Image (cartoon, rainbow, N blue to C red):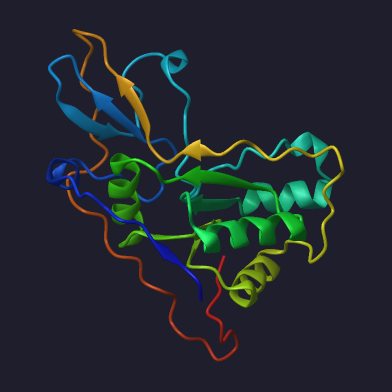
Amino acid sequence: MKHHTIAVLLSSAALLGSTMGVEAQTIYRIVGADGKVTFSDKAPVTADQGKVASTGIGAKTDTTGAAMPFELRQVAAKYPVVLYTSTQCVPCDTGRSFLTVRGIPFSERTVSTNEDRDYLRRLTGDNSVPYLTIGSQRIRGFSDQEWNQYLDAAGYPQKSLLPATYKRPDPTPLVVVQKAPAGAAKPADAASTPEPAYQPPAANPSNPAGITF
């Protein structure tokens, strides 16, 4: 399995701050008027002050579904695919090309700032990319065999059904940074305790790969 480890400048303040639940769909890094930094899944003010980025875990993938065949649109809505990448990461480039060639509609989250790296570490347990989610399934590193296995289990077609007019959404940052205006109410913290480490499903003789959706 191929992966690339991101060099991290860990921020103790960020690591000791409020952690997000695995099912969170929007991550905000909010800088208050007093300079205090908080993480939350609730925007501090109106949505037009910043673009929403999804973590991908349990989130809906922006895949311009109207351009896709019905059967592909169904599986993409049920098991959205999200790829986490960084720059100068050969396995990330390989994984992106793999998904594109197979015709998988996916969203891409870029990991480039310290905030992105801190959150990726809390989300996955380390700083390795690429990191792929298919619905609630999480796959660390690139392996064409493993990725194919999970995509097949989710019901994605083995050959591309995407029309020539399909356009993949542009990559977006993992963490959105917003500044709260003076006097704005502090957003509710998503959680005060670290989320538990991911536990792989138990072995099942009828399903040796342990893939469950």
**x, y percentage for residue 16?**
14, 46
Q: Quadrant of residue 181?
A: top left
Percent position (x, y) of residue 172?
Answer: 51, 36
The relative height of residue 151 versus residue 36 in the rendered view (above or below) is: below
Left or right? Give the position of 24 relative to 150: left
Q: How many marks?
A: 0
Q: Examine the image and state in which quarter residue 107 appears.
A: top right
Q: Residue at x 35, y 51 (%)?
A: 120
Q: Residue at x 54, y 64 (%)?
A: 91
Q: Quadrant of the C terminus?
A: bottom right
View extreme (front): residue: 88
Above or below for 43 versus 86 = above
Residue 105 x/y as whole percent:
69, 49
Left or right placement of residue 5 versus residue 141 in this view: left
As rendered, which of 134 and 89 lies closer to the eye?
A: 89
Residue 31 vs residue 25: left or right?
left
Residue visible at 41% across and 46% down in the picture:
111
Q: Can you name the residue that lies furthest to the bottom here?
A: 205
Horizontal side, residue 18 vs residue 106: left or right = left
x and y percent of residue 69 in the render?
A: 84, 46
Q: Residue at x 49, y 52 (%)?
A: 85
